[in-house]
Structures are given as structure tokens and as C-alpha cells.
Image: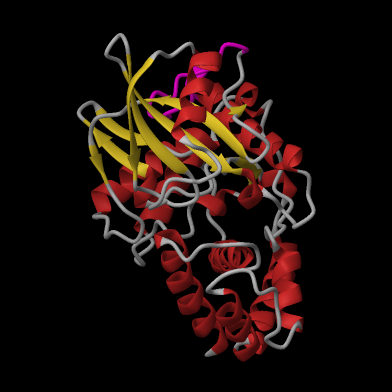
Amino acid sequence: MLSPPPGLPERLLESVLARDWHLAVTSMSYLAVGAGSHHWEVTDARGARWFVTGDELHYKRDFAGEPLDAAFGRLRASLATAVALRECGLGFVVAPVAAAGGAPAVRANEGFAVAVLPFVEGQSFSWGESFPLASRLAVTDMLAAVHTAPATARRHAQREDFSIPHRDELELALAADGAGPACGPYARSAGKLMADNAAGVRRQLDRYDKMTAAADPARLVITHGEPHPGNMMLAPSGWRLIDWDTVLLAQPERDLWSLDPGDGSVLAAYAAATGVTPRPELLEMYAVLWDLKDIAVDLSRFRRPHRGDHDDDKCWRVLKMLVEQMGAG
């Protein structure tokens, strides 16, 4: 996220860090990196550096009226699973540091959750960045270890239900013929965008619903959910997998659909490491789901009060591109 969140001012964040992690903050810098969560670099009185995340729980909801407690519960379950994986010996998992009460994340207020992680030195990457085959294979090795982790690591993880977060708002927008709430600078444009491309978006929704029938409950594994280059770091001691807020028990293809360079090499390496052959129909299903989730979440942003800040501008560009692609078939 590019802009600090008004709902989580630094004074409040500092008090949460002191209360729940006993950190005496001496410096705090907002990091305009990533998407979905807000990030800060924090230094404490002992000189230790920390990576602090703040998640706006509205965007963790599955539907508009869902209680924020449920959204926080899913986030906490995901982060607790990362902790469990780390405890099982998966040293590449950058897991949260437990708060004083033992939880991997706490509520700063009604709308925001906070987690504290070790600060990792190393090379960062970005979503969409081209990864060489050697890097893809290193990521595949990490995912194979996650997918074959001991059963004890699963105890907190929730099962995928194939829902599309904020689908209810997406369906409303598709049926509204361009009308919608006048709640910010992108609201009317978003409504018109959905109206102009409604047929294509509906086709993809129907297609995705049919594709979920191919999922097999017997193939459930712990999945990271977003193992793209933006969630990888190359530290001096090796690769790290970060941002574990989307963990679910799901089909292995949830983590694999974007990794293969197109020649089958990554998928073959995964099959050799795990004994599980990725299924093309499920790889395609998760690719479709990825775009539909981006559309629904970004559309939801513009159906509630927004300011037109840098994050809104970025989300609008992504929403417009994806919806117009679907509209064009």
C-alpha cells in the first residue's frame, strides 16, 4: 500500500506495540510497499528492527455484512499456521512474533489488525517481475515443503470454500446498470465500467463456478495462497517466503498456477518432490479465481467512501484493466 491508513495513526500503532509486544519504539517509518496490508519499519530501544503490518479488516471480509470479528479470525488462523510451519522446522517461513498473550496478531481497534515480524535483510521483488527458472524452482521447493508439512501444522488452518470475497457487491454492481453509491471519485466510473463489461464478467463467474467441481477434498494441503515474486525475499542465508495472511487448506494448484514458465518444468519438479501431479483444470481455475478476486475486492473499495489517494489510483488501474479484459472475452 502506498499511503498510510487514516484509521491506524502512528500514535495508536506505537501504543499497540508497547502494550502487546512490550516494544519501546524509538523510530517508525511507513513503507510504501506491497498490496493489501500496510507496512512499517520499527526500531526499538534495544536497537532491534521489526517489520510491522496493519490490515484493514473490511478488505478481509468475504461479504459486505460479515462481522469484522470473522475476518479477523481468518487472518489470525492464517498467521497461526505460519507460526506452526516455522515450529515444524521450515526456516524459510517468515512468521509473526507472538504478542504478550501468545496471539500472532491483535486488534488495534475495530477496523485494523496488527502483527509484528522479524525484519529480514535481503533482496526484494515485485508482483509481475520476471523470475528465472532457478528462482522458480527454489520457490517450488519451499512450496513442496509447505504442502507436505506434518499434520500438526494444520491445526489452525481453515479450509478453502471457493468463495470470492465481496462477490455480493460484485453481483450488485453487475445488476445495477451503471448505478451505484456516490461515495468517492471513482464510484461512478467503477459503476459504468462494470455495466459496460457485465456480460464478460458474468461469463467468467459462471465458468469459475463450474470449474470448482473438479476440486478433490482428498488433495487438501496447506497453501500460502500468494507465492508470487512480491512475497519472496532472497536473504544472505537463502530464500524466504513472506506474507502469510492468505493461508488455507486447499488444492495444491492454488500455489502453483502462476509458477511454471510454460514448459512444464516447474510442475514436473513439484510432482517429483511431492508425488502429486498438478491438474491443468485446477491450475486454470485458480488463474480465473485470481482475477475475479482482484476485481471484486477493488470494486468493493470504490463502493465505500474513498479519497482518491495513490492507493485508489493504483487499484483503479488494475480494476479497469482486468474488467476490460474480461469484457473483451
Q: Quadrant of residue 39?
A: top left
**Image quarter hosting the C terminus:** bottom right
Rendered location of residue 305, percent (x, y): 62, 62
| Most distant residue in the left direction | 236
Q: Is residue 124 above or below residue 24?
A: below
Q: Is residue 50 magenta?
A: no
Q: Is residue 181 above or below residue 266?
A: below
What type of secondary structure mainly makes up the magenta span?
loop
Instruction: Say left or right for 318 vs 58.
Output: left
Rendered location of residue 294, percent (x, y): 55, 64
Front-most of 103 and 265? 103
Res. 329 visible in picture: no
Q: Quadrant of residue 181?
A: bottom right
Res. 258 visible in picture: yes
Which residue is pictured at 32% across the width and 50% down the height? 136
Q: Which residues are magenta?
A: 86-101
Which residue is pictured at 31% across the width and 53% down the height? 126
Q: Quadrant of residue 179?
A: bottom right
Q: Is residue 253 above or below residue 307?
A: above
Front-most of 2 and 77? 2
Instruction: Say left or right for 55 vs 76.
Output: left
Q: Is residue 22 above or below residue 156?
A: above
Q: Is residue 92 magenta?
A: yes
Which residue is pictured at 67% across the width and 86% down the height? 178
Rendered location of residue 308, percent (x, y): 47, 66
Which residue is pictured at 68% across the width and 60% down the height? 164
Rendered location of residue 2, percent (x, y): 38, 53
